[in-house]
Amino acid sequence: MKKAIALNINGDSYDVLVNPNNTLLEVLRDKLGLIGTKRGCDLGACGACTVLVNGEAFLSCLMLALDAVGKEIVTIEGLVHDGELDPLQKAFMENGGLQCGFCTPGMIVSAKAILNEDDHPTESVIRKKMAGNLCRCTGYKKIVESVLSASQTAGKER
Amino acid sequence: MRLPKFLYEEPSTIEEASSILLEKPAAKILAGGTDLLVNMKHRVEEPTVVINIKRIPGLNYIAQENGAIRIGALTSLKTISGSALIAEKLPALAMAASSVGSYHHQTMGTLGGNLCQQNRCKYFNQSRWWRSARPLCFKAGGEICHVMKRKEVCHASYCGDVAPALLALDARVRLGSKTGDRQVFLNDLFSGEGKNPLLREKHEILIEVIIPEEASLGLSSYIKFANRESIDFPIVGGAFWTSPETKACRVAFTAVERKPVRGEKVESFLNGKEISREIMEEAMILASKAAVPVRNSIYDPAYKRTVMKLLLQQLVKQTTGRRVS
């Protein structure tokens, strides 16, 4: 039986009709057209579908849409403010932190969650906390460098 | 991959959740969802009702009371591994919580959900397509166990990381229901049976974990031996606790049997002893016999027994800071 719910995504309220078995990822991509969040393994092993739920990194493929009611959800689309890219997005571009780009939204959102918790994470902290985001192109080095560079930029801005 | 269809319930009290479980025995409890939803996508679990207990208030806390540490079942693994109190008093628990899956799983996953996770087997945790090459296994609703080629048994292993740490810390769990609460030792929560790994009444819900003061006065640690640092379940996981005063100790392993096991023979052998090289060697042999792993993962049972042996050595070294080999 479908239910009408309101989801708070990227600061906007969306009214959607969902089935109990719809995951947040399905609603984001298939109902709302927010296709920046990627569907990778769809089993919680690759991290491509990472979104922020109340500021923390959640796997949207393993979260029911009904469970997301009342929570603040931010997707990769929500990191852009007034046409200005987030410092993390800029850092990924400047440091070559992506190749094919499929894992990138998940990588950047996971990195955002890390920087939300800790302004200046060490390389080992970044590597441990992003270990659930798989990338088949870059070999991770430039991704970690991008996050480190963004954390330094963030520090300077403050 | 779509989830199968189900009815969704969002109770606001334990009593309400318990009533739903009583009325609908095929219902499943949803907490973090990182275990249940994967199994549902694979169609090895298809509950008719899913009860989301995350909206029940008052189950997310870490508190110290008369020395004992109490943790609510909905406390996330990330909160536990990040807690200064847990890191100081119960390092084994902090280490175990931070070794579960990836950081995302630790953010989403809860203490209660991790303890109550399904057992795992290479014939069970597979997609429907993969499993379609064989008759349905007993755990997934068929008749035969492909591990032992026998009917109506299940040899899936318990692979949770947190349970051995809590066993070594001698924890108890509180089960809530509409008819009242009861406390059991964590060891008594596990049935040792692959198909239904938990021993609880169908209307009971794990609501709290209680770790006695004695545990926080000792030293403890957890080691997960796995293929990769992220995502993987342990090939073998081990936890060790010892009291510097009495030299009493407790050891527990995971991913080697149908339930997390205490190495009781190792414990009684090591109890009160100053651990020398000879004693360690003997204890390691006992550790390798603490469980009987079967061929239900891609790792050979003999290999798992060797890992158990080496884990004990590493655990003692890591816990006490002394090299004994």
Image (spheres, coloured by chain):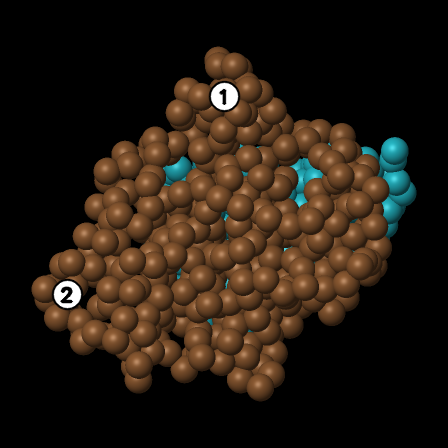
Q: x, y (%) of residue B27? A: 74, 40
The quarter of the picture where residue B53 lies is bottom right
Numbered disc 2: secondary structure: helix
| Residue at image point 55% right, 35% down | B195
The one nearer the camera, B278 or A52, is: B278
Numbered disc 1: secondary structure: strand
The one nearer the camera, B187 or A114, is: B187
* Chain that bears disc 2: B
The residue beneath circle 2 is B279
Q: Is residue B207 visible?
A: no
The quarter of the picture where residue A129 lies is bottom left
Image side of residue B132 versus residue A136, left or right: right
What shade does chain A have? cyan
Which amino acid type is shown beneath numbered disc 2?
Ile
Q: x, y (%) of residue A2? A: 87, 35
| Residue at image point 47% right, 24% down | B145
| Residue at image point 63% right, 47% down | B33
The quarter of the picture where residue B297 lies is top left
Q: x, y (%) of residue B315? A: 27, 63
Of mark 2 and mark 1, the one earlier in the sequence is 1
Q: x, y (%) of residue A25? A: 67, 40
Quarter in which the N terminus of chain B is drawn: top right
What shade does chain B have? brown
Examine the rendered structure and indicate whether residue A29 appears above or below residue A15.
Answer: above
Which amino acid type is shown beneath numbered disc 1?
Lys
| Both labels 2 and 1 in a single chain | yes
The one nearer the camera, B134 or B198, is: B198
* Chain that bears disc 1: B
Tag 2: Cα neighbours inside 10 Å, few (<14), some, or many (≥20)? some
The residue beneath circle 1 is B151
| Residue at image point 55% right, 20% down | B143
Image side of residue B228 versus residue B201, left or right: left
